[in-house]
Amino acid sequence: MATYGAVLRRFAAVVERARAHARSTRKALARFARPQSFAAPPDAEAAAVRAVRNLASFRLYYTLLLWVLLLASLFPRRRATMLFLMAASKVALCYGALLKAFPTSALLRRVIDRRLVVALALAVILIELALTRALPQLLLAVGIGLPIILLHAVFRVRDDLLEDGDEKAAAAGAAGELGSVLEKKEDLELGSQ
């Protein structure tokens, strides 16, 4: 009976972590596309800064959008290529899961660099698309997705909240506290759950 309580406590901790992760994912998706967070940048320099910040912040979502567009363009006639791409995405997800499961692994972090894995996966995918003559579908997906991504990156207001939060930044003092203040402000806007 003593181990039963320990198992329940571990299970409760796992469930709580899963709920917290689901909540943070829901908040991130809500922040990604809410209409109040889009505004025209005041000048070209602000647009460039905003685009760079948003490309860094939303790179996973942008990659997912391009991946879905590529799969959708391959669906009608190139099912074998589509299945290969889905298998490649499973390999990438397994590598990501290994990074998450073993965050301090020297083998995964230093020897097998993330950039190396991404470059190899991209090379294999591009070679496979070239061999199956599916490069027009890739160009179509990039041609549709890239303007959407660039428009989102330029018009999405993310870290430009500093104009509103200058008083809070002075009160907060440290730069690390500024991030938590802005995060709390966004959570209040979304309605924390």
Image: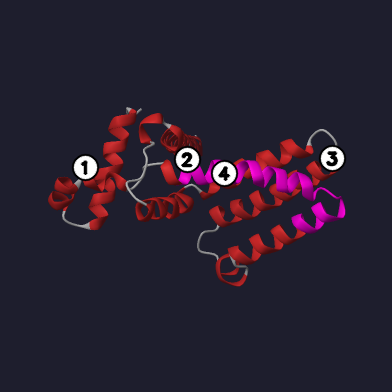
Using the image as rendered, state which of residue 97 and residue 158 is in the foreground.
Answer: 158
Q: Is residue 29 left or right of residue 142?
A: left
Instruction: Please rate how many residues cluster around mark 1, counting C-alpha atoms within 10 Å: few if below 14, some from 14 to 19, many from 20.
Output: few
Distance of mark 2 from mark 4, alpha carbons?
46 Å
Q: Position of residue 106 (x, y in %)?
A: 55, 69
Say which residue label 3 marks.
78
Mark 3 and mark 1 lie on one chain; the one further toward the N terminus is 3
Dominant secondary structure (helix, strand or loop) of the stretch shown in magenta:
helix
Please give the name of the residue rendered at 54% of the width and 47% of the height, measured from the top-left corner: 60
Q: Position of residue 167 (x, y in %)?
A: 14, 46
Q: Is residue 160 above or below residue 191?
A: below
Could you tell me the amino acid type at mark 4?
A: Pro
Distance of mark 1 from mark 4, alpha carbons?
29 Å
Magenta stretch in the rendered image: 125-153
Say which residue label 4 marks.
147
| Disc 3, SS | loop
Q: Is residue 179 left or right of residue 21?
A: left
Q: Magenta segment: does it hold 12? A: no
Say which residue label 2 marks.
10
Quadrant containing the C terminus in the rendered view: top left
Say which residue label 1 marks.
164
Label pair 1/2, CB-CB below 8 angstroms: no
Quadrant assignment, res 110: bottom right
Mark 2 and mark 4 lie on one chain; the one further toward the N terminus is 2
Could you tell me the amino acid type at mark 3?
A: Arg
